[in-house]
């Protein structure tokens, strides 16, 4: 049996469950995530679509750019998910919306080309300028 983790939005209207194994856990520095969340970085855990279940409520979707859908709670506005045509069978969950965000720590920084200079990370994680495998 795989480990399961639950999470949800700020107001509690939306609850979800994910099942391991996670495909990745990362910290994204891209400008789109910065604007969507109002934060210099966003933590993500990616799972296959069949490992993601909405337990209560409904996730509203917003197409933030062609082929990209960002999910959020319609009541409180909490950013919950990211889905894109580039990853057709995956759901990327904002790590901080997990009930215990410590369970799936990040292993990489992505899109560091968009890093905000005053936000400095001091960890040993790999840094990638994009989403691909090149640094």
Image (spheres, rainbow, N blue to C red):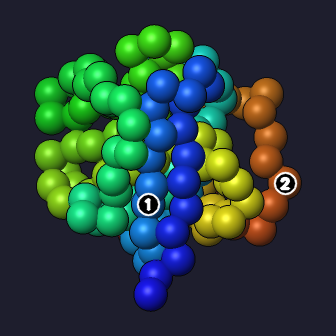
Q: Are marks 2 and 1 in contact (CB under 8 Å)?
A: no
Residue corresponding to mark 2: 122
The foreground one among 54 and 98 is 54
Identity of the residue drawn at 25% across and 32% down: 69
* Crowding at mark 2 (Cα within 10 Å: few <14, some 14-19, many 20+): few
Residue 56 higher or lower than 110, as above or below: above
Separation of marks 2 and 1 at Cα, in angstroms: 29 Å
Q: Nearer the N terminus, badge 2 or badge 1?
A: 1
* Crowding at mark 1 (Cα within 10 Å: few <14, some 14-19, many 20+): many
**Where residue 88 sits in the image (x, y, percent)?**
15, 55
**Where residue 15 sits in the image (x, y, percent)?**
47, 40
Mark yes or no: residue 122 visible: yes
In the displayed structure image, the side of residue 99 where residue 32 appears, left or right: left
Residue corresponding to mark 1: 18
Quarter location, residue 10: top right
Quarter location, residue 115: top right
User: Disc 2 or disc 1, which is closer to the eye?
Assistant: 1
Identity of the residue drawn at 43% across and 69% down: 19
Identity of the residue drawn at 24% across and 64% down: 50
């Amino acid at each position: 049996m795989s480990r399961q983790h639950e999470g949800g939005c700020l107001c509690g209207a939306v609850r979800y469950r994910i099942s391991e194994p996670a495909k990745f856990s990362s910290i994204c520095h891209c400008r789109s995530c910065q604007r969507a969340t109002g934060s210099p970085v966003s933590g993500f855990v990616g799972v296959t679509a069949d490992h993601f279940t909405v337990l209560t409520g409904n996730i509203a979707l917003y197409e933030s750019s062609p082929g990209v859908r960002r999910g959020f709670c319609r009541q409180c506005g909490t950013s919950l998910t990211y889905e894109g045509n580039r990853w057709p069978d995956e759901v990327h969950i904002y790590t901080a919306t997990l009930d215990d965000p410590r369970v799936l720590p990040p292993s990489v920084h992505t899109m560091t080309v968009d890093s905000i200079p005053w936000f400095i990370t001091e960890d040993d994680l790999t840094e990638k300028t994009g989403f691909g495998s090149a640094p």
